[in-house]
Amino acid sequence: MSSSRVDLKVVLLGKEYGGKTSLVERYLHDRFNADLPYQNTIGAAYGARRVKVGEHTVTMGIWDTAGSERYEAMSRIYYRGAKAAIVCYDLTDSSSFDRAKFWVNELRQHEEKCKIYLCGTKQDLVDGDLKKHRSVDYYNTTDFADEINARVFETSSKTGNNVRELFYKVAEDFCNDPTNFQKQDDSTLHIYDEPQGKSCMC
Ligand SMILES: Nc1nc2c(ncn2[C@@H]2O[C@H](COP(=O)(O)OP(=O)(O)OP(=O)(O)O)[C@@H](O)[C@H]2O)c(=O)[nH]1
């Protein structure tokens, strides 16, 4: 197994049952299994992927944190040093958007340089005839995004809609910021870079 530097640490934050693990599973392994019973993340899970953006190839290290408030203190550890945070909320659960605001506030206070992406999950459940299930208004999310200088994506891990686009945008924004390509010191994290399964770091 080869080891490689992680250029871009990305953390996923949000309420439990909000769809974070499914989003990472869809992105890293292109799979979604609706028949599997829900299993809450304990601690956090890690996966990595190389992404090519123009002339750059960056290794994205993705931390999927536990949404349960029981693990809140631990989730704080995982956003340290993150260049990007994907703050997820479930489009069928308005309280999950309140929780997303909580995480945005945390990031703004403690990790100022971390770029924030708001991600409304389970978009397939509020699409077309299923619109009545939508509990988070799109324009509320874009207004909030404007306030905090973030982008909004609505994704479905079931259909794959917008998932690659979201992660590509994270990588692209990173590559478009020249300060990210200044010489790094020896404290850079080195880890294995192949896509990895869900692991518990409890
Ligand atoms: N229909 C639909 N269901 C989804 C989607 N994403 C997630 N789910 C379902 O929502 C439930 C919770 O998803 P998870 O990805 O485990 O949520 P999580 O945010 O990782 O949860 P925690 O680990 O508790 O923080 C699971 O039963 C998923 O199958 C989606 O895009 N569409």
Image (cartoon, rainbow, N blue to C red):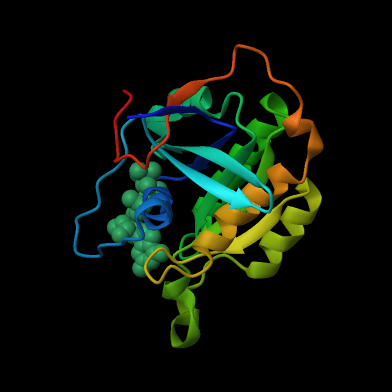
Across and down, in percent, residue 18 comes to 42, 52
On the rendering, which quadrant does ligand 1 occupy? bottom left
Residue 8 at what x, y percent from top left? 59, 35
Query: Residue 24: x and y, percent?
Result: 41, 50
Q: Residue at x 63, y 47 (%)?
A: 171
Q: Residue furthest top?
A: 186
Quadrant housing the N terminus:
top left
The residue positioned 59% from the left and 55% from the top of the image is 168
Q: Quadrant of residue 33?
A: bottom left
Q: Residue furthest bottom?
A: 129
Left/right placement of residue 95 relative to residue 157 reads right
Is 181 placed above or below 167 here? above
The one of 56 and 142 positioned closer to us in this rendering: 56
Q: Residue at image x 58%, y 57%? A: 166
Which residue is nearer to you in this view: 13 or 52?
A: 52
Q: Position of residue 40 (x, y in %)?
A: 29, 42
| 183 to 165, vertically: above or below | above
Which residue lies at the image location 70% right of the left edge and 56% below the top edge? Answer: 151
Circle count = 0
Q: Quadrant of the C terminus?
A: top left
Position of residue 97 relative to residue 160, above or below, is: above
Using the image as rendered, state which of residue 92 and residue 172 is in the foreground. Answer: 172
In this view of the protein, which residue sits in the foreground, 4 or 38? Answer: 4
